[in-house]
Image: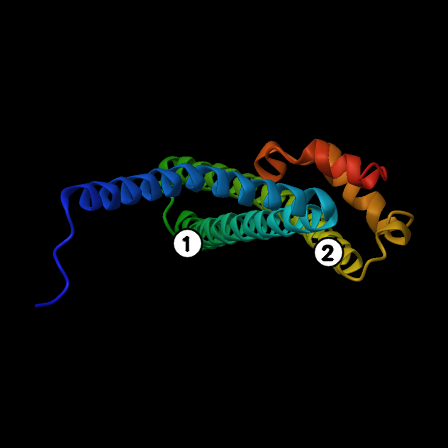
Amino acid sequence: PGSSPPDRSQLNLAAAMRGLLLILALAASPVALHGLEQKEDARFAANPIRKVVTMLQSMQAKVTEEGKKEKELYEKFMCYCKNSGNDLSKSVEAGGVKIEQLTADIKSSQEAHGQKQADLKSAQEGRSGAKETLAEATAIREKEAAAYAAEKSDSGANVAAIEKAVAALEKGVAGAFLQTSTAAALRKLALEASGSVLDDHREELLAFLEGKQ
């Protein structure tokens, strides 16, 4: 004795219920996912300042990285100029020694006077050319150093402006920040910076700086 086994109709009903529950679960999944996406979009729409902060932090990282690359290129160029300048200086010094030796030889050897005079002229011309090349290399190096200093100064100012913007936004004083000289510097960066720094955020940043967000 004991409970009797379920008949076929009960088994069919249970199977049908399981199938219905599975269909409802599958149907609810995209609905729930869509609901989550709407909540996420609403969260960003309700907090546009966070979006601007994230954008500024991304810009700060890119500006800093470009500054590092500029510094690396500058240091390599300065190393090249230093080595080239040393070689030219040695050439000038060697030319001076050779001129002194040839002058002494002319005085002591009249037989080879003609050849020595030619050698002396050649050495003088070579030394003069080396001096000109050294002067040109020095001028180029000074020009590149000045350009790098200006580039480094601009890069540092841009990073500082972004840091101040992020700090102001996180403190909730965006309105007051927009009236500062730092905001003006950011506006200049947004208008003049290359696309690799701003990507697709230029219009959004300008809108924020103009108080439209």
Residue 103 x %, y %: 46, 49
Residue 158, above or below 122: below
| Residue identifier under label 2 | 166
Look at 14% across and 43% down and name the residue there: 8
The image quarter containing residue 4 is bottom left
Between marks 2 and 1 in the image, the one whose residue lies nearer the viewer: 2
Numbered disc total: 2
Check disc 1 and report its element: helix, strand or loop: helix
Q: Is residue 208 visible?
A: yes
Residue 19 x %, y %: 28, 40
Front-lying residue, 198 or 99: 198
Q: Amino acid at mark 2?
A: Val
Q: CA distance from mark 2 to mark 1?
A: 69 Å
Residue 125 x %, y %: 49, 36
Front-lying residue, 36 or 127: 36
Check disc 2 and report its element: helix, strand or loop: helix
Residue 1 x %, y %: 7, 68
- Spot the residue most to the bottom: 1
Front-lying residue, 70 or 7: 7
Residue 118, above or below 88: above
| Residue identifier under label 1 | 101
Label 2: how many Cα within 10 Å (few below 14, some 14–19, many 20+)? many
Residue 74, above or below 194: below
Residue 197 badge? none
Q: Tell me if 47 is positioned left or right of 210 in this view.
A: left
Q: Amino acid at mark 1?
A: Gln
Look at 89% across and 50% down and name the residue there: 175
Q: Of label 2 and label 1, which has the lower sequence position?
A: 1
Label 1: how many Cα within 10 Å (few below 14, some 14–19, many 20+)? few
Front-lying residue, 133 or 164: 164
Look at 70% across and 46% down and name the residue there: 52
